[in-house]
Structure formats: structure tokens, C-alpha cells
Amino acid sequence: MARDKAKDSPSDKVGTICRALRRAIIEQALEPGAKLPEDALGERFGVSRTIARHALGQLAAEGLVELRRNRIAVVATPSWQEARDTFDIRIELERLVVRQLAGRLSKAQLATLRAQVDQEEVARGGSDAVSIRLATEFHILLASMTESAIMIRYISEIAYRCCLTLSLFSRPHSSECAINEHRLLIDALESGDAEKAMSLMHHHLDSVAERALVAQAKPRGRDIMDILAPYADAPVTRSAVRKRRLDAAE
């Protein structure tokens, strides 16, 4: 049975918008610097501008959105140095994750991690953006297995920020390298070798940064309503948007 959208609380609606925008940013559909108008988001997701504003505020707290003067919000545009610093911080945090998990994962958890890498394998050769998203989800899945709320929060936020930098400073994504490195990480975690797992994680994320932080991507420039159509739970057609505007004008 479909969810009754009318019964969604404001926090549910904010969460829906955040998840959609976050995924659009991760998959590089929304580029750094892209404008995020409150009215367009409200129309696309069928919410008020106030709800849209709250969602943008939450994403700003995560570092994915910049709030500028006159209530203008855009996808954040980190500098090259900020991007490199983000990866360096992420390396240290994720070394802590694998140190905690080494030798402590259940067979079911190991199977879940391997299933995630299998998804990465299936996606190999397709869209770089999808491969990057799946690789990021692997790292967030690892963090979730620590059952530490603060670790999950920090890893999730910094992993999303790294995705943002990949859309700004990038060359073709080497999904094959990432997949092989993920499999080696799982093996080290299963064997209980914490030192090896930390070393592998350091090398893996450092290699991702080196492979990615090369050149600034060229902007594509597309309409936000078209960009967000696949990400919205209840997409609004252009004709419906035009009708709303005409009704409002009357």
C-alpha cells in the first residue's frame, strides 16, 4: 500500500527532501554551485517553502549546501584544499571504524557487506555516479555496524562531502580498484587483523583521493525540476507546476 503523503509529519517531509537532494548530489545530477530555489523544491515535492527551507538548512549543516544572502541556497563548492582535508579527516575516522569492527562481525554482517560489493560489481562499467554512490554506501554500512550513533553521523556526513568533491574534482572513476579494495577490507575484518584493516582503509581512501582530485569538472547546466524528477517520491509535472502558478496568480 502506498504511503499516505497527507499524513506525513513536517519532519518526514524534510527527511524526504534531504534524502532526495543528497542522492542527487551524490550521483552528480546536482553540481556544485547549482541553485536550489525554495519555491522549485516546494513544487517538486509538494511542500511549503518553509519545509523546503528546513531541508536546505539541514543539508547546510552537513556541508552539502551553502546558504547565501537573500535566502539563496546552492550546492556547496569546496576548494581543492578543503576537498583534500576532507579526505584526510575521513581516512582517520574510517581507520577507527575498521579497528572497532575487526574480528567482531557476524557471518550475517559479513554477508551483507559482500552483497553490497556485489552490487558495485554489477554496476561496474555503467554510470560513474552510481558506482560512486554504491561505494559510499559501503562505507556508511561499515560505520552502521559499529552501532555508534556519533560514528555513524560523522562518517555519513564526511562521506557525502567526499562525494561532492568527486563531482567537482574528478577524472573517470576506477570502480574496479574500489571493488577489489573493498573485498580485501572485508577479508581483513573477517580475519580479525585490525592493523591490516586500518592499513588497507588508509591506502584505499588515499587512493580514491589521488584518483579523483585531479581536475575541475565542467558545469552542465540543467533545469532543477528536470534534475530532481527521478529523485522525488511524488514528482510534479511541468503542466501541473504551470497550473499552480496560474492558480496562484488568480
Image (cartoon, helix red, strand yellow):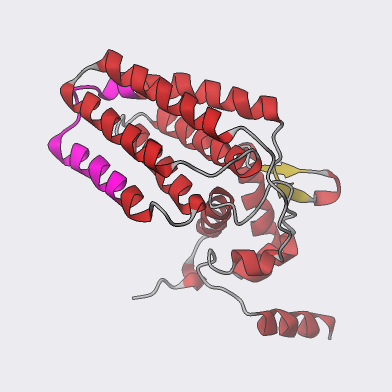
Identify the residue at image location x=53%, y=33%.
Answer: 211
Asked whether, in this view, residue 64 is left or right of residue 16, the answer is: right
Q: Is residue 133 above or below residue 203?
A: below
Quadrant that contains the C terminus: bottom right
| Image position, residue 114 (x, y; %) | 24, 42
Taking the spot 68% from the left edge, 80% from the top edge, the residue there is 238
Residue 148 in sight: yes
Is 3 in the magenta? Answer: no
Percent across and percent down for residue 51 are 64, 58
Which of 130 and 174 lies nearest the eye of the viewer? 174
Please report the bounds of the magenta region as a residue range: 98-118
Q: Is residue 225 left or right of residue 201?
A: right
**Which residue of the protein is positioned furthest toward the left in this rendering?**
107
For residue 116: magenta?
Answer: yes
Where residue 45 sits in the image (x, y, percent)? 60, 67
Residue 117 vertical placement versus 145 (above, below): below
Q: Mark yes or no: residue 47 visible.
A: no
Q: Tag count in the figure?
A: 0
